[in-house]
Image (cartoon, rainbow, N blue to C red):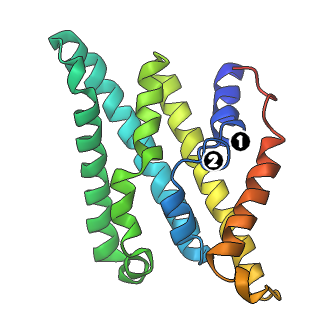
Amino acid sequence: MTEYFLLFLSAAIVNNFVLSRYLGLCIFFGVSKNFHASSSMGLAIISIITMSSMLTWVIEHFILQPLGLYFLRMIVFVVVIAVFVQLLEMVIKKFMPTLYNIWGIYLLLVATNCVILGVPIINSEEHFTFLKSTVNALGSGTGFAIALILFASLREKLQFSDVPKSLEGLGIAFILAGMLALAFQGFSGMIPL
């Protein structure tokens, strides 16, 4: 049980995709202007990463490897992720149109997000079991959501600050993201995995 807890913490905090590996930055900067949009996008990413990792593990171990079609792994992973994103888009558009409008193009960018694709690939490369794969995916999605929510909170507070004219917008956002990444670097080396 401790092994799974450490794997979760490692994926969420120590090896955070956004703040340690610098992946998924398009959504990170695009959606983080609004706290509500960021928190809901964080939940969407957690669910997409977890469900797609579980399904890709099953497909890889019960279809691709037995049939000798391992070379199709990347294509299959992309298709599975695209299906989950499309399903999520249909549900959000039907039941939460306001949220759908807030997310805009960033919901479609989730399908091509390197974090969403990176987690199943890492699970495959590390030869994780189904349970480890699921825990790693859940931790990675949680880490992405934590980074997104923290960054959105800081950006909303920053709107009330006196920012120099030359740094307004993305300039100060990049500085803020760098400081947040530097804070997360303090966790590196904490969990030996």
**Could you say whether the residue bearing mark 2 is in a helix, strand or loop?**
helix
Residue 66's tag is none
Q: Nearer the viewer, residue 84 or 103?
A: 103
Per the model, the C-alpha gap separating discs 2 and 1 is 6 Å
Q: Is residue 54 left or right of residue 170?
A: left
Which residue is located at x 28 percent, y 42 percent?
78
Pointer 2 and pointer 1: residues touching (CB < 8 Å)?
yes
Quadrant in which the N terminus is drawn: top right
Report the residue marked by disc 2: 143
On the picture, is 164 further left or further right than 133?
right
Q: The disc labelled 1 sits on which kind of residue?
A: Ile
Give whichever of 119, 165 is nearer the camera.
165
x and y percentages locating residue 8 in the rendered image: 64, 34
* Tag shown at residue 13: 1
Pick whichever, 158 or 145, lies toward us: 158
Q: In the displayed structure, would residue 72 be above or below residue 75?
A: above
Q: Residue at x 24, y 18 (%)?
A: 70
In the image shown, does 55 or 116 lie closer to the viewer?
Answer: 116
Write down the quadrant of residue 153 in the picture: bottom right
The structure residue drawn at horizontal position 47% and vertical position 36%, both measured from the top left corner, is 119
Badge 1 element: helix
Query: Dividing the picture into quarters, in which one does residue 86 lie?
Result: bottom left
Kind of residue at badge 2: Gly
Q: Position of residue 124 (x, y in %)?
A: 41, 22
- The residue most toward the front is 166
Disc 2 residue crowd, few under 14, some 14–19, many 20+, Cα 10 Å: many
